[in-house]
Amino acid sequence: TVTEEFTPILAEAKIDKKALIIYNSVILSRSSINGRDYPDEVQEAAIPIFEGAKAYIDHPDPDKSHLPRKMRDLIGEHRNVHFADGKTYSDIYLLDKPIVHEEVLPPAQSMPHVCGNSVAVRISVKKDKNTGRDIVEKIHAARSIDLVTEPATTKGIFEGQESQNFGMEDSSMDWKDVTLEDLKKERPELVEEILSSAKEKERVTT
């Protein structure tokens, strides 16, 4: 839900209020304060996954993260996704709706450092024995890229996050994308229970 140096806001980054586009927003960088690292090659491979991802305002409540997102929270989508200098960027194409004009554009224009993007992704990781951090091996799917006030890997709309900044990253799983291999790896006891149940049902019916 990465060790990176803070750099100034990119000169070419801008907000086109009339066209409702936020150009060059950072959606992911090398490190998350949640203890996960996103290597450059993993970010580059995920460009097609992030292209067209929906943008919502705020993350859902944890106990409702498995439910479909609400239409009223949808603020746009991410386009023109690209990778450069350890960060993944996108242009956020915003919807022409009150929540965008009232709650998204004002801070984005006057205080872009107070909000940023936070990805909701399904990932495969391995543990780094030396640092104890999770190294992301692959980003399998992206549910959304949400605009929040405490992003985990981005410092603001246009900048990457440093390790001392507080944030929130969502690595929630979209169950329609779960494979048998995922279950074997993450929930082997559940797979065993399913197999046992199937064998018992077969025994009873034969």
Image: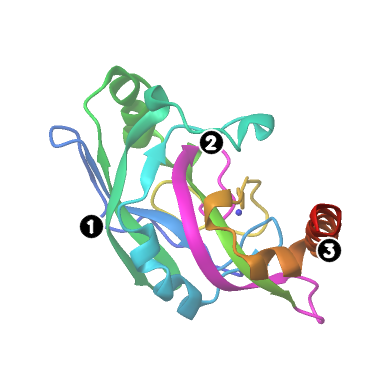
Q: CA distance from mark 3 to mark 2?
A: 41 Å
Q: Secondary structure at mark 1?
A: loop
Residue 175 rendering spot, x and y as whole percentages: 58, 50
> What colour scheme does the image use?
rainbow
At label 2, which amino acid type do we have?
Thr
Look at the image and give the residue range highlighted in magenta: 128-154
In the image: residue 122, left or right of residue 87: right
At label 3, which amino acid type do we have?
Glu
Crowd around label 2: few <14 · some 14–19 · many ≥20 (10 Å)? many
Query: Who comes first in sequence, dot 1 or dot 2?
Result: 1
At label 1, which amino acid type do we have?
Glu
Q: Pointer 2: what residue? A: 149
Q: Nearer the viewer, mark 3 or mark 2?
A: 3
Dot 3 and dot 1 residues touching (CB under 8 Å): no
- Asked whether residue 71 is drawn in magenta, I would say no
Q: Looking at the image, can residue 174 be seen?
A: no
Q: Quadrant of residue 17?
A: top left
Q: Pointer 3: what residue? A: 192
Which residue sits at x=54%, y=55%?
A: 121
Which residue sits at x=38%, y=22%?
A: 72
Q: Pointer 1: what residue? A: 12
In front here: 147 or 202?
202
